[in-house]
Amino acid sequence: MDWSDLPIFLAIARAGTLGGASRTLGQTQPTMGRRLRALEASIGHALFQRTSDGFVLTEEGQALLAHAERMEEEALAIGRELVGADRSLEGLVRVSCSDWFGVTLLAPVLAEFAAAEPRVVVELLTDQRLYSLARREADLVFRMVPFDEPEVVSRRLMQIRYGLFCKTGTPHPIVGDGHGTALIVMDSAFGGMPDVAWVRRLLPRAHIAARSNNREVQAALCARGVGLAVLPKPLGVGTPGIERIEVDDEPPSRHTWLGYHRDMRRLARLRALMDRVIDRLED
């Protein structure tokens, strides 16, 4: 068996298609297919059933999957241990957070850090995906859901307060139960978030004019008069063309947590970045 073929096997098992696996690993589909066939030939078993919906693990593939995942975890642990022992203030730190948090709150801190530590490169990933700390998809993660992984060291960073915003100068934007009022809310995948439930209780007869999973898009639509939006106050206050509406019952606030893998706790460049973020943003 060629051990370097096991990451190919794992990527296909997780993605279910050659195309998805090739995007994950940055290789071409023909290369992925050729290496999978070589792996199957070397062990004498078919590892996948090829179906119209994609690749489905055979019994032999299921058996190999458990071993391959344990091998992957050991290899990742070796990498984390070696990287985590690096005491130099240079190299890459990969950070993950939401879009608005990265632009509004984190970017000014990163600018300061870049000036202070020019040999450290911070790669900021802003989307809704939860990046894996164990696989080193990210070294430092900011999110609004507490970490429950036993290998993750985490702490509460700050409380995020929300407000109801409208286009600047909009006269009497709230009328009674919201009849005739337009709303900008999260997309349906995030419809259960506290701010969505809050605004629907406040304005039960308001209609939804637009949805987005991007808070900055919501703020931009609000500034163009599309409707009212519940936004994090740092974003709303900092967005030109919108103003906060005073209401008796404020939207629910949320907490932001930061987390990193315990194997990375001695990584000097990660510690330096965290210290600056905590100094600037912690409540």
Image: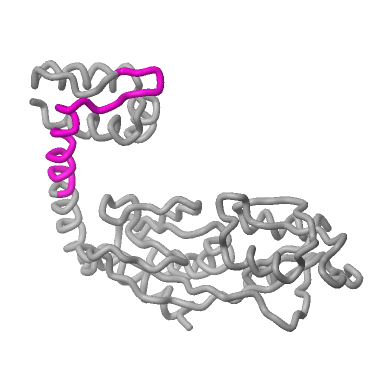
Of 208 and 172, nearer the camera is 208
- Residue 221 on image: x %, y %: 75, 55
Residue at horizontal 78 percent and vertical 72 percent from the top: 243
- Residue 46 on image: x %, y %: 18, 19
Residue 251, magenta (yes or no): no
| Residue 234 picture quarter | bottom right
Which residue range is magenta in the image? 50-73
- Residue 206 on image: x %, y %: 79, 61
Q: Viewed as shown, does residue 163 lie left or right of 222?
A: left
Extreme right residue here?
171
| Residue 86 picture quarter | bottom left
Of 131 and 80, nearer the camera is 131
Q: Main secondary structure of the magenta part?
A: helix
Name above or below for residue 124 compared with residue 60. below
| Residue 8 picture quarter | top left
Residue at horizontal 16 percent and vertical 53 percent from the top: 77
Name above or below for residue 158 compared with residue 51. below
Residue 60, magenta (yes or no): yes
Of 117 and 187, nearer the camera is 187
Residue at horizontal 22 percent and vertical 34 percent from the top: 7
Location of the N terminus (image quadrant): top left
- Residue 148 on image: x %, y %: 31, 66
Residue at horizontal 41 percent and vertical 54 percent from the top: 130
Count how many numbered circles sit on residues in the image.
Answer: 0
Name above or below for residue 12 compared with residue 103. above
Q: Viewed as shown, does residue 109 lie left or right of 28?
A: right
